[in-house]
Amino acid sequence: MLVETSAQGSAPSTRPRVSGGRVHNDAPDTAADFARLATLPEGPERDLIRDELTKVWLPMAHRIAGRFRNRGESLEDLRQVAALGLVKAIDRYEPGRGAFESYAVPTITGEIKRHFRDRMWALRVPRRVQELRNKVRIARRDLAESAAGANPSVAEIAAHTGLTEEEVNTGLEALESFSTLSLDAEMSSSDDGFSLADTIGGCDEAYDVVIDREAAKEGLRRLPERERAILYMRFFEDMTQSRIADQLGISQMHVSRLISRCCARIRDEALDQGSRPEHCCDEGGSGRTTV
C-alpha cells in the first residue's frame, strides 16, 4: 500500500462503528491518507492513494447498497453504483471539515437514489410524484403489517401519511409506472397468440376524410352552379373530363381548367380557415375526392 501509513509498515486501522444497534467494522482510520491526498498534484502517486482509499472504504459502500436490495435492481449493479458514489465522495472530500464517513454516506446514498430515479423507472415521472410513490409504498407496507395483511384503503393511507387522498391516488398510480408490461405479453393462457399489442388500435384514415369533407363544404356552396355540377360529375359520378365536356357542350381543356381552378379555390379557402383538405379534388391517384 503506497499510502502514508504503509510507509510505516502498517495498514489503515479499522475502528468499530455503532449504527442502529449494530457494530460495523467498515470505517477505517484514513485521516492521514486523506490529508496526504489533498497535498498531492495529479499524478501516479495521487492515483495510488486514491485507489487504496477506494479499496478500504468499499465494504461500507457495499453495505449501503445492500439497504436497497429487492427493489427491482440486482445487488451487483447496486454495488457498482455505490462504488461510483464512493469515488465521487473521495474526490470531493475536504479534510478538516468533518469525518469522511459523515460525508461519504449521504453521497453514496444519493447516488443510489439517483440511479433508481433516473434509470429504473419505465416511465419518467416528476420527482414529486416519485416521492409520493415512496411514501405511499412505505405506508401501505406498514399498514398491511399491522392489519394482518389486509390492503389499506386510500383514506387509511392518507391518514397515516398526512397526504390528501388525491396525492395518495397519484402515488398509487406511480407504483404502476416503475415497471411496464411488454407489448408481446400474452393476455390469455390459450394458444391463439393474443397479446397486449393486439388490443391497441391504429390510425383510422377515415377520420382524415371526414375532416377534409367538412373543410371543403363551405367552399363548394360558394361555387357557381355549373362548377358544382362539374365537380359532382367528375368526383361523385366518376365521369371523365371528355364526357363532362360533351354533356355541357364545352371543350375538355376548359373542363380541366375549371376543375383545377375550383379545387384550388376550395383548398385555399379551407386553409385560410385553419383546416387542411389535403385530398380535396385529388386527380393524381384514383380520381376520387373528399369533396
Image (spheres, helix red, strand yellow):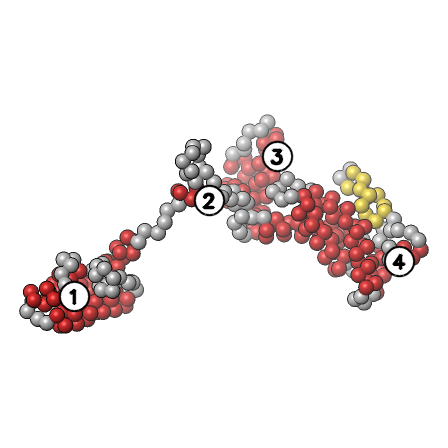
Three-letter amino acid code at disc 2?
Leu
- Which SS class for mark 2? loop
Label 3 sits on residue = 142
User: Does label 4 or label 1 sit earlier along the sequence?
Assistant: 4
| Residue 90 percent across, percent down from the top left | 76, 57
**Which labelled disc corresponds to residue 4?**
4
- Which SS class for mark 1? loop
Q: Please state which of the two labelled residues, at mark 4 or mark 1, is closer to the viewer.
A: 4
Q: Distance of mark 3 from mark 1, alpha carbons?
A: 71 Å
User: Does label 2 or label 4 sit earlier along the sequence?
Assistant: 4
**Which labelled disc corresponds to residue 11?**
none
- Which SS class for mark 3? helix
| Residue 155 percent across, percent down from the top left | 51, 36
Asked if the residues shown at circle 2 and circle 1 are in contact, with their CB atoms under 8 angstroms apart, the answer is: no
Q: Please state which of the two labelled residues, at mark 3 or mark 4, is closer to the viewer.
A: 4
User: Does label 2 or label 1 sit earlier along the sequence?
Assistant: 2
Q: Distance of mark 2 from mark 1, alpha carbons?
A: 50 Å
Q: Distance of mark 2 from mark 4, alpha carbons?
A: 58 Å
**Which labelled disc corresponds to residue 222?**
1
> Could you tell me which residue is drawn at 35 percent across and 51 percent down?
203
Q: Residues within 10 Å of mark 2 (few under 14, many from 20)?
A: few
> Could you tell me which residue is drawn at 59 percent across and 27 percent down?
148
**Which labelled disc corresponds to residue 183?**
2
